[in-house]
Image (cartoon, helix red, strand yellow):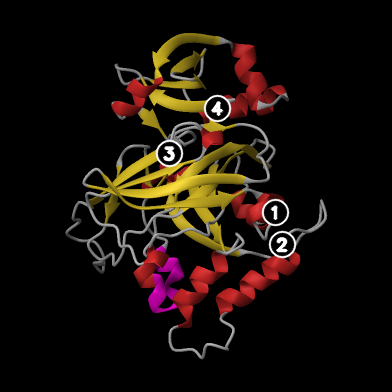
Amino acid sequence: MRLIQFETAAGERRVGVVEGRRALEVQGATSVRALALAAIEAGRGLAGEVLARGLGEVHDYPVLLREGRVLPPLDHEDPAHCLVTGTGLTHLGSAATRDKMHQQQAEAAAITDSMRMFQWGVEGGKPAAGQAGAQPEWFYKGDGGIVVRPGAELPLPGFAEDAGEEPELVGLYVVGPDARAYRVGFALGNEFSDHVMERRNYLYLAHSKLRFCSYGPELRLGELPHHLEGSSRILRDGQVLWEKPFFSGEDNMCHSLENLEFHHFKYTQFLRPGDVHVHYFGTATLSFADGVQARPGDVFEISLGEFGEPLRNGIAPAAETPRAGLVQAL
């Protein structure tokens, strides 16, 4: 089952089940978060909650996408209660690009910190069930205020040195009233980072991740196949500028999803009841590694058959904030 959140022509929020070109309203549901919390309270899965409520009005899904009325598939009415984070160096092959970025003046034979962390993942990132494995790289992107809906443009701040896509799987979670994290499902994501800044020094990684991002348009319920193969491409003036397959799923990762989830939700500050968590699982495919630099006007397109419609986002200069970075003493 795949779900979307969308707005009606009157601007009212709805949750829909995707069936081909149709989106069927879930009766009595205005948000996936509320639907998930109801499922937790009822002691059943999200798909079971949807079936229990039944389906109603039918909408033209392509029209919803074309008119920009599809929302991120999980959010929070208060953006401060939606935490956007991620893990890196999680995929087989991901270390090669990062290592190339971070070697800089180091001797070719020297092992970088990126390669060392990747090796820890290879050696201990898939522990036995119920056990904690190697700790992955972790980063913070922001709260729900940095999320743009599918089809919208990703704002590029004036101080940015790059506008690089990162095609990834995203885990979507709601924290229940029992202070336990519940995985709602998975979505496609574009993690959008500043790779030029990161390449200057790996200690700038934290800065490079403080950018807008997007995920969706669809929420896929249930377990994932162990092997997933999709496509990431950049369109410029309507033509394909760059295109490459990307692989995900645990067969293509050095960490298990369970291990990545454990090392995020082991922190009690991430277990506040009612909160939403959006967690990017990493990638091994970057156009930046092939010497491509995207720019305003370009369009990113990330597709993977098991997730329905592609995730598309453009790039646009961010609106200027005259006092950004300035602090006034009181």
The amino acid on which the numbered mark 2 sits, given as a three-letter code, is Gly
The amino acid on which the numbered mark 3 sits, given as a three-letter code, is Asp
The amino acid on which the numbered mark 1 sits, given as a three-letter code, is Ser
Quadrant, the N terminus: top right
On whether residue 257 falls in the magenta region, the answer is no
C-beta proximity under 8 Å, tags 4 and 1 = no
Going by the picture, which residue comes out furthest to the top?
A: 56
Q: Which residue is mark 3?
A: 78
State whether residue 62 is above or below residue 162: above
Residue 72 x/y as whole percent: 43, 35
Badge 4, how many Cα within 10 Å: few under 14, some, many 20+?
A: many
What is the CA distance from the residue labelled 1 to the residue labelled 2?
A: 6 Å
Q: Which residue is mark 2?
A: 125
C-beta proximity under 8 Å, tags 4 and 3 = no
State whether residue 328 is above or below residue 180: below
C-beta proximity under 8 Å, tags 1 and 2 = yes
Q: Nearer the viewer, mark 4 or mark 3?
A: 4
C-beta proximity under 8 Å, tags 1 and 3 = no
Identify the image quadrant of residue 116: bottom right
Q: Secondary structure at mark 1?
A: loop
Q: Secondary structure at mark 3?
A: loop
Residue 258 x/y as whole percent: 71, 50
State whether residue 142 is above or below residue 100: above
Boundaries of the magenta span: 198-208
Q: Which residue is mark 1?
A: 256
Residue 102 appearing in the image = yes
The amino acid on which the numbered mark 4 sits, given as a three-letter code, is Arg
